[in-house]
Amino acid sequence: TEFRGTSSHNSVFSSSLTIRSSYRVKIANAGIADAPAVVGTTAYVGTGNSQVYALNLVNGSVRWAVGVPNSVEATPLVDRGRVVVALGNTVFRRYSTKLGWIRGTGANGLMALNAVTGSDEWYAPTQGEIMATPVISGSVIYAVTGASRLIAVNLDTGKREWSLRLKGFDSFSSPVVVGNHLYVATNQYFQAYPARRSTVWSIDLEAHHVAWVRDLAVASGLSDCSIAVDGGRLFVEGVPQVSSDGQGRRVSQRLFALSRTTGRVLWSQSLGRGSLPGLDQQEDGTPLAAGPVIYAGSPASNRVEALAAASGRVLWETRLHTGVMANPILLHGRLLVAGTDGRVMMLNARNGAVMGIDPVNLGALGAASPLVVGDVLVQSTMNGSLAVQRLGY
């Protein structure tokens, strides 16, 4: 019912699920931008070529497949027998003198499909894309759009219950709900770069108003990062500096820790700088909150770092051969890290030492972190395939 299944972003789940042998299944001619949702033995997967699949995760067979009216960049959500799908794409559709650039062309919004059959149940259109994974809390779906609006939609009917205008669009910052507050990050552009505003929001879901707002000194990327929450702190990555050519090819990156109750910046730490291989690429990574330690990767500097959650002190830093866009996950004292070059790596969580690199190159990997269910590792790829592997320990 939320991004990574947990506000810490550690997508590791106990289950009796097992498979006889590892396999890869090609299901799309476009990327699978984020991880699937797994319920029992079924994986629900959205694709960049406007398809949603229900796969038997034991053997990769298709239980059902349906077409939808736009790209599915987010993880589907599953609750009360429904699969909630977010629709939207990366295109900036038009310009508003009040809002700046509005993102998302075509049919944007939320759809609900029957989890057993894939049949349509309802469609809730929006102005602007929904590429970030929404969150379900109780009977309400919360999503933030490319047109600077938080919407609250009834899970059973698809009717909008209320909405709130924000200043800035959401690209891939999946909202997280803790208690009765929702946290999300946005950017506002009146030109290409830098952003007019890069903002973290706390929304009181009972009162339907902004509890606090914090603008951070970053030029871009904040709306690409899903906020990790652990205790009284929020963790988010942003891009303080963008290359002078205005194309975003060379960037610096920084991790921020904020107070969950006030939005005050507690500390910030550089994650280095480097070059991005493409223009339309997520500009920063996503952190993993693991109690006293925060783990963060960078798609530009090719670094993974462990930092003290209370102070931001760097505990260790490992430079890899490739960038890291997705958050690492923590399993039995090891970090599983998806490199953008297509290889999944294993690092010692205590000291950052590289313990192993999967010899199989899966193809380009995007913002989808590894997902562990039982003894099964699932990795989405940007070449439209799903890699399903047995863990070796």
Image (tube, grey):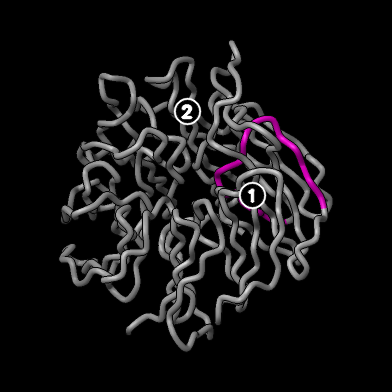
> Residue 232 versus residue 76: which sits nearer the camera?
76
Residue 24 relative to residue 59: left or right: left
* Closer to us: 154 or 87: 87
Mark 2, secondary structure of its residue: strand
Q: Quadrant of residue 217?
A: top left
Q: Amino acid at mark 2?
A: Asn
Q: Residue furthest front?
A: 29
Contact (CB < 8 A) between labels 2 and 1? Answer: no
Residue that badge 1 annotates: 50
> Residue at (32%, 76%) from the top-left corner?
332
Label 1 amino acid? Ser
Q: Is residue 100 visible to the viewer in this orientation of the structure?
A: yes
Estimate the spatial distance between the alpha carbons at disc 2 and disc 1, rounded to whole Å: 26 Å
Q: Work out whether 374 lies above or below 130.
A: below
Bounds of the magenta segment:
122-138
Position in image of residue 37 (x %, y %): 58, 64
- In the picture of the structure, the residue carrying the numbered disc 2 is 187
Q: Please name the residue shown 43% across and 73% down the image.
A: 377
Q: Nearer the viewer, mark 2 or mark 1?
A: 1
Classify 10 Å Cα crowding around label 1: few (below 14), some (14-19), many (20 and above): some
Residue 192 in the image, given as x and y percentages of width and height: 42, 19
Q: Quadrant of the C terminus?
A: bottom left
Please tell me whether mark 1 sits on a helix, a strand or a loop: loop
Question: Where, quadrant-wise, is the N terminus in this rendering?
Answer: bottom right
Question: Which residue is at the far bottom?
Answer: 20
Residue 137 drawn in magenta:
yes
